[in-house]
Amino acid sequence: MNHRKTRPVLRSLAIAVVCASLLAGCATTTSSTGRKQYVGGVSQDQLDLLGSQAFAQIKGQKSLSADARQSAYVGCVVDAIVSQLPSPSPDRTWEHALFIDKSPNAFALPGGKIGVNTGILDVARNQDQLAAVIGHEVGHVLERHHDERITRQMGASGAVQVLGILAGARYGQSGAQAATQGGSLLAIGGFLLPGTRQQEGEADVVGQRLMAEAGFDPRQAAELWRNMIAASGRDGRAPEWLSTHPDPASRIAALEKRAESLMPLYDQARAAGRRPRCS
Ligand SMILES: [Zn+2]
């Protein structure tokens, strides 16, 4: 018996059945790296709403940094990255929040929301390395990874809860209220859980390309990972970003190799005047 082979097939089948039984427009699509995806368990509007609600909930739970300069620095990198998103995303205003939290972590949510912990600024030592983090997280949104997760969860009791939250949101309840009534929004959405290995690899590919297009040095993505590993050695504890993003060694090799092929794109961006100066 080869469980490793049969399991994903069964899971795919289960999701396909869920897809077929849902009223919403569940569909099979192909990601930009050629991976088959089940998405559409909820509509894009609903997904954006869930992202916004989750963001409101996180902001209610965590301490926001009062350092205006540091927040503007993060915003500068975010703006440069999202300005490279394919249409219709450029029209959207992306909101970011800088949280006082030593763990080096960041996230992006559907609905144009980005959260960055102050701890990430200890390992992302320049604007290009921060762009590697932001690009990766935005890559998760761009490739509909939250959509995939929600669609998978719609199959279980999650469907009722997700729809409950959406109904609550429609009637103007706060994210926290809606979440209390419908269960934990973050748990249901699985918004902050690490992605699958495939999703992580895909976010790397998409994120590194975004950085190059925005005029950030794609070679710095590998440097970021070296800093991550060094940081984990220092206090003997793996930084969160490292522990939730598997296989750092082979990742660095892949990022380095890809950086070479992205250099023409980077040079082109610089020549076109995309030279971010975030500080
Ligand atoms: Zn990730």
Image: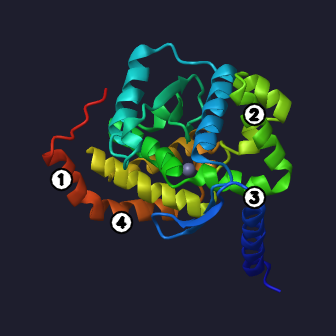
Nearer to the camera, 278 or 168: 168
Residue 85 at what x, y percent from top left? 37, 46
Residue 45 vs 94, above or below: the answer is below
Residue 111 vs 144, above or below: the answer is above
Residue at numbered disc 3: 22
Mark 4 belongs to which amino acid?
A: Lys
Distance between the alpha carbons at the discs numbered 1 and 3: 45 Å
Which of disc 2 and disc 3 is earlier in sequence?
3
* Mark in the foreground, 1 or 4: 1
**Under tag 1, what secondary structure?**
helix
Task: Determine which of the numbered discs, if any, sits on residue 167 in the image.
Answer: 2
Distance between the alpha carbons at the discs numbered 3 and 2: 17 Å
**Under tag 2, what secondary structure?**
helix
**Under tag 4, what secondary structure?**
helix
- Identify the residue shown where x is 25% and y is 35%: 276
Residue at numbered disc 4: 257
* Mark in the foreground, 3 or 4: 3
Task: Determine which of the numbered discs, if any, sits on residue 142 in the image.
Answer: none
Taking the image as shown, residue 54 lies to the left or right of residue 264, namely right
Which of disc 2 and disc 1 is earlier in sequence?
2
Residue at numbered disc 1: 268
**Under tag 3, what secondary structure?**
loop
